[in-house]
Structures are given as C-alpha cells and as structure tokens.
Image: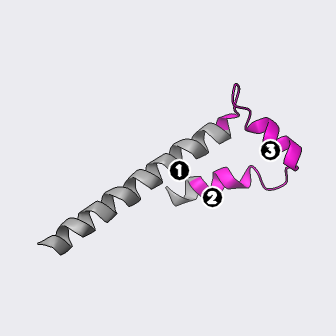
Amino acid sequence: MSRSIHWTYKIFKNKSRREIIDMCDFDNPDYAVVELRKKNKIKKNVKEKRAEEKIERNLK
C-alpha cells in the first residue's frame, strides 16, 4: 500500500499549482486523484478501526 501511495504523490511532484487544480477538477478528476482519494479513505478507515479496537481492549 505505501508504495502505491508514494507513486501517486510523485505524479504531483513537478506540476504547477494550476496544473494540480486542473487535475483535481470536481466534475472530471484525473485518474491519479481518484486513486489518491480512495487510498486516503482506506487509510482513514483503518486508523479509526484500530483506535476503536484499542479502546475496546483497554476497557476489558
């Protein structure tokens, strides 16, 4: 997972601010932007799940 996230961020590396804004167009986003959103959503869900599990373990 981490390799693919680093690969996705490399796509933005040499882009100007205007190019990145164009890539993140809400109506027609670039493929890399869509992938980055998916990966960020997965990471967020995993972190939340681990936090919930930690709380449950501490309550026992």
Tag 2 residue: 6
Front position in the image: 7 or 12: 12
Tag 2: amino acid: His
**Residue occupying image coordinates x 80% and y 44%:** 20
Tag 1: amino acid: Asn
Q: What secondary structure is marked by label 3?
A: helix
Q: How is the image coloured?
A: one colour
CA neighbours of label 3 inside 10 A, class few (<14), some (14 to 19), many (20+): some
**Label ID, residue 26:** none
Left or right: residue 29 versus residue 58 is: right
Left or right: residue 41 versus residue 50 is: right
Residue 13 lies in quadrant: bottom right
Residue 11 locus on image (x, y percent): 74, 49
Residue 35 lies in quadrant: top right
Q: What secondary structure is marked by label 1?
A: helix
Tag 1 residue: 40
Tag 3 residue: 20
CA neighbours of label 2 inside 10 A, class few (<14), some (14 to 19), many (20+): few
Dot 3 or dot 2: first in sequence order is 2
Q: Which residues are magenta?
A: 5-31
